[in-house]
Amino acid sequence: MQLRKFAVCLLFLFIPVLAQDDTLEWLGDYKQALEQARQTKKPIFLEFRCEP
Amino acid sequence: MLSPKTSPLGKLLDQYIRVRITRNDDSDIALFERDWNNTLYYFVMNADEQIYLRYGGRDARGPLTYLDFDSLELALKQGLELHKHYQNGELKKTDRPQPFFPRDIPPLVERTFAKGQCVECHLIGDFQLIDKEQKGTLDKIRDMYRWPDIRNIGIEVDIPRGLVVKEAKGPAQSAGMKPGDRITALNGTPVYTWADIQYRFDKVPRDAKQLGLTADREGRPVSVAMALPERWWLTDLRFRQLSVDPRSEFECRPLTAEEKQKYNVKPASFAGEITRIGGFAQMMKIHDLKTGDIVTAVDGVDTDEIANTPELYIKLRKHAGDTVTLDIIRDGKPMKMPVNTQRMFFRK
């Protein structure tokens, strides 16, 4: 039982580390991008990618 | 996708809200107008939908001709700079074009939405043309020859350095453009990237005789008024495989004045020599032309106010699918040759 608790604690400790992804996030929704840009006052980099 | 957060590009991108659109169904194609044959294309803009600059561009050589990490980095830096100016009220607000959506093009709706298929970028351009052709409003010079390249006016840019001129030839050289100049405006409108200049160049009326360019030369602004050459708008249509142009599966060069005299054709004639036969000519039974054939007329016509070759005359004045008769000279003998032009069929 204690081992199980330890494993769960370890998992919670590592979740933030695992979440520190080095890649940049991209939104997939244009309206959401406008909204976020409004809130953060950042400009938008919009990619159109044709994926036939 | 492009870069890790810690790289120079990543650090720049991190200062942006990044969004990737892979379906055009609900895209405002008036606001995001571009050469629809681009596989990748970028807009740097703000929450008010003001576009600061465009990034991307391609030509017949390939889809990546004008995509390059160095020039992208320059564009991203420029975008941040413009955004600062916008926030400080130093950048004039531009008018947003009247919204226009893929659903506003009836043949495109029939081809995609009605079948539950993706509105692929190139289909937008293709069906805009088809729509105009069906409505009888197609202006081939304006609509079919879209997105001319500034190489047509003698400007070769140093791609990684954005709009820095690498080589100025012909009209650009005559107008005073020099290698090292960084182009900053076209007809008074600021341009920051190759995509920007292509976008603005395409907006020039096809009958324009002059073009104004502004450049930065060693820190000083210089402006030139350039005489536009004939057919400055001409582009290579071969990679636009679903276009409305009649495919004749041959290419030719205009005859010189001496050659016209030799073959006894008018000085103003669009007569030309066949330089290449397309791969589908025989397979599709389009014609039996050979390289070296001299074409002197198309359906009895030998002059045109725009066309300088029989190939261009057919593209501008005939419909895809028309059969035309060429007057040719082969091995010194005059002959008649039918050409069954083709409409490129859709690949799906």
Image: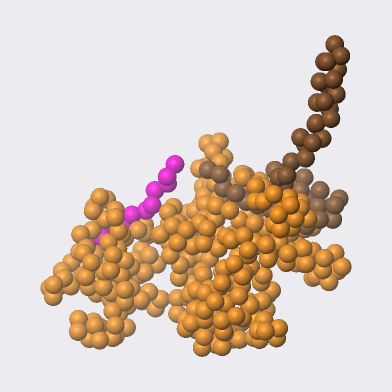
Left or right placement of residue B76 versus residue B310 in this view: right
Snapshot quadrant of residue B204: bottom right
Q: Which residues are magenta?
A: B338-348
| Image point (71%, 61%), residue name | B76
- Chosen colour scheme: by chain
Snapshot quadrant of residue B326: bottom left
Query: Hue of chain B?
Result: orange
Magenta stretch: dominant SS? loop
Q: Does residue A50 lie above or below B164 as drawn?
A: above
Q: Position of residue A3 (x, y in %)?
A: 83, 15
**Residue B142: in sight, yes or no?**
no
Q: Does residue B195 lie above or below B120 as drawn?
A: below
Q: Residue B277 colored magenta?
A: no
Q: Residue furthest top?
A: A1
Left or right placement of residue B189 versus residue B118 in this view: right
**Which quarter of the image is occupied by the C terminus of chain B?**
top left
Number of disc labels: 0
| Image point (40%, 67%), residue name | B316
Snapshot quadrant of residue B302: bottom left
Q: Residue furthest front?
A: A3
Query: Hue of chain A?
Result: brown
Left or right placement of residue B192 versus residue A40 in this view: left
Q: Residue B341 colored magenta?
A: yes
| Image point (22%, 63%), residue name | B289
